[in-house]
Image (cartoon, grey):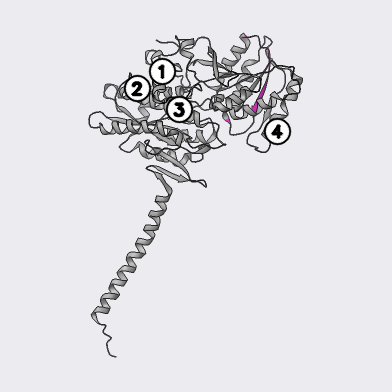
């Protein structure tokens, strides 16, 4: 059989063709994958996730999670660049501020509240790095977005765990978001990986037993005690509790349970009816449930209605009471700190109801002037008119107290970092978490919301609680500074 011999130029073309096919077989999938990755990225460390392509993850300030955050993120990015640029002279570790920064109607927080949180976190970073509390190692502040309703907490937590073992050496996570099942799951996972945790506004009493965890906010039990003490001093003897029955709302359940327990006593303070409930998880029903309650309250005639629910539900409840059948009867509503998450517009709308509204807040800028013995002046001054935040972020009123609480949370992490570094100690998440147990006496945190020392479960000891009044302009006014048990802690 004759041998088939191809001309050399054909052989070359075939060989080149085979090579090209092989290259394309590899390159095309890689290119498609690269294009897909680029489309999925919002910025360094931030990806699009979920059906709404929500940008979630961890940023050093280079990616603005929302337009209203650009001013504060720009300052955080500049400070982070300065810290990293001086790393050969001054070592640094990282602290992340984690919450939901991209918000929808499903969130209890508002854009105003999370913006104020980030402003307060930046102030604490600045004070620790090169302000009046300058110390070492320096802090790089990371911004961790878990998405609306913390839907993407797993992705963001995994990113934070990766940063722990990177050059940025993450040691603590502050902020942490509201008291929900998803937040609790995130806390446990971060704790399991040896990170110190400082909650800024988380108040649900049943969050406990987590290694390395503390909070700078009073618990719901403490808020209920402070509210009850105030009401009893002002001759209130009867109340009714209205509570959100949604299973995932730890805040509402523990707040309602706590007030029910502490208000009733043998001296004639009592609840005049069974607890009235609505379920915010049933979207088609909860607003109607609230609309039917005022008629019952007219019959029960309580001196105070204690509302254990989120701030955004409170506005609907007040609308309902404003249209009550017994218009001749005056109503007072006492509620918890989630009212601080309402926007100025929502607060003004709530004030229009004609119902007197009191609530236990977490902090207020006027606390220092009202009670200078129990609030750290050097911290509180930054929140006064003309203070640091006014200069950096003008025309952004911060009466909701969120900036103060975020500042105190990051300040607590910074204080733990400073203590862990003492006597050439190694600064790790576990070491910082252990330092929280030593923050007492002269080592207590000199916060703008009060002097902070921690109990064994991580709760602040007898924390100062402001009693606030929602005035006719929708602004929170400080009535007095209360405490769960007697006098709040003072400077040592």
Disc 2 target residue? 127
All told, the count of numbered labels is 4
Mark sitting earlier along the chain (4/2): 2
Image coordinates of residue 166 in percent, x first then y, are 32, 38
Query: Do the CB atoms of the residues marked 4 and 2 lie less than 8 Å apart?
Result: no
Label 1: element kind: loop
Mark sitting earlier along the chain (1/3): 3
Image coordinates of residue 127 in percent, x first then y, are 35, 22
The extreme front residue here reads: 395
Disc sitting over residue 288 in the figure: 4
Query: Do the CB atoms of the residues marked 3 and 4 lie less than 8 Å apart?
Result: no
Disc 3 target residue? 117
Image coordinates of residue 205 in percent, x first then y, are 54, 24
Please give the name of the residue rendered at 53% of the width and 9% of the height, measured from the top-left corner: 486
Label 4: element kind: helix
Mark sitting earlier along the chain (1/4): 4
Within-10-Å neighbours for mark 1: few <14, some 14–19, many 20+: few
Query: Do the CB atoms of the residues marked 1 and 3 lie less than 8 Å apart?
Result: no
Disc 1 target residue? 386
Within-10-Å neighbours for mark 3: few <14, some 14–19, many 20+: many
Question: Is residue 241 found inside the magenta-colored segment of the image?
Answer: yes
Label 3: element kind: helix
Placement of 182 over or under 26, stated as above or below: above
Separation of marks 1 and 2 at Cα, in angstroms: 17 Å
Placement of 274 over or under 161, stated as above or below: above
Q: Is residue 194 visible?
A: no
Query: Do the CB atoms of the residues marked 1 and 2 lie less than 8 Å apart?
Result: no
The quadrant of the image that shows the C terminus is: top left
Magenta region: 234-249
């Amino acid at each position: 059989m004759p041998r088939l011999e191809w001309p050399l130029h054909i052989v070359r073309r075939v060989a080149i063709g085979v090579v090209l096919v092989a290259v394309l077989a590899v390159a095309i999938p890689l290119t498609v994958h690269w294009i897909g990755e680029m489309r999925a990225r919002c910025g360094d460390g931030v990806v699009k996730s979920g059906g709404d392509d929500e940008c979630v993850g961890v940023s050093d300030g280079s990616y603005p999670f929302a337009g209203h955050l650009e001013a504060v993120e720009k300052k955080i990015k500049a400070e982070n660049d300065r810290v990293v640029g001086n790393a050969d002279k001054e070592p640094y570790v990282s602290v992340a501020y984690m919450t939901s920064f991209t918000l929808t109607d499903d969130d209890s927080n508002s854009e105003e509240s999370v913006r104020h949180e980030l402003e307060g976190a930046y102030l604490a970073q600045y004070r620790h790095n090169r302000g009046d509390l300058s110390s070492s190692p320096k802090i790089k502040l990371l911004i961790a977005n878990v998405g609306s309703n913390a839907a993407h907490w797993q992705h963001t937590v995994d990113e934070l765990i990766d940063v722990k073992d990177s050059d940025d050496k993450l040691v603590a996570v502050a902020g942490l978001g509201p008291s929900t099942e998803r937040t609790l799951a995130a806390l446990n996972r971060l704790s399991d990986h040896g990170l110190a945790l400082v909650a800024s506004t988380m108040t649900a009493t049943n969050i406990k037993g987590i290694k390395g965890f503390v909070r700078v906010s009073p618990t719901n039990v403490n808020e209920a005690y402070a509210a009850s003490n105030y009401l009893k001093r002002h001759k209130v003897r009867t109340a009714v509790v209205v509570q959100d029955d949604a299973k995932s709302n730890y805040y509402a359940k523990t707040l309602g349970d706590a007030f029910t327990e502490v208000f009733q006593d043998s001296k004639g303070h009592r609840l005049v009816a069974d607890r009235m409930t609505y379920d915010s998880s049933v979207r088609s029903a909860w607003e109607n449930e609230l609309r039917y309650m005022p008629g019952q309250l007219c019959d029960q005639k309580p001196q105070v209605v204690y509302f254990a629910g989120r701030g955004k539900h409170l506005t609907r409840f007040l609308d309902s009471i404003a249209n009550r059948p017994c218009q001749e009867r005056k109503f007072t509503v006492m509620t918890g700190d989630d009212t601080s998450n309402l926007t100025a517009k929502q607060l003004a709308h709530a004030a229009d109801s004609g119902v007197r509204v009191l609530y236990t807040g977490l902090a207020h800028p006027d606390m220092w002037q009202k009670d200078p013995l129990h609030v750290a002046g050097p911290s509180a001054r930054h929140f006064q008119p003309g203070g640091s935040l006014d200069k950096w972020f003008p025309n952004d009123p911060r009466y909701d107290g969120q900036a103060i609480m975020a500042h105190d949370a990051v300040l607590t992490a910074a204080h733990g970092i400073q203590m862990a570094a003492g006597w050439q100690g190694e600064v790790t998440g576990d070491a910082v978490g252990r330092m929280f147990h030593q923050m007492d006496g002269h080592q207590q945190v000199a916060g703008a919301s009060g002097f902070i020392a921690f109990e064994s479960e991580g709760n602040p000891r007898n924390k100062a609680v402001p009693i606030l009044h929602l005035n006719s302009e929708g602004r929170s006014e400080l009535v007095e500074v209360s405490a769960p048990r007697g006098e709040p802690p003072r400077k040592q």
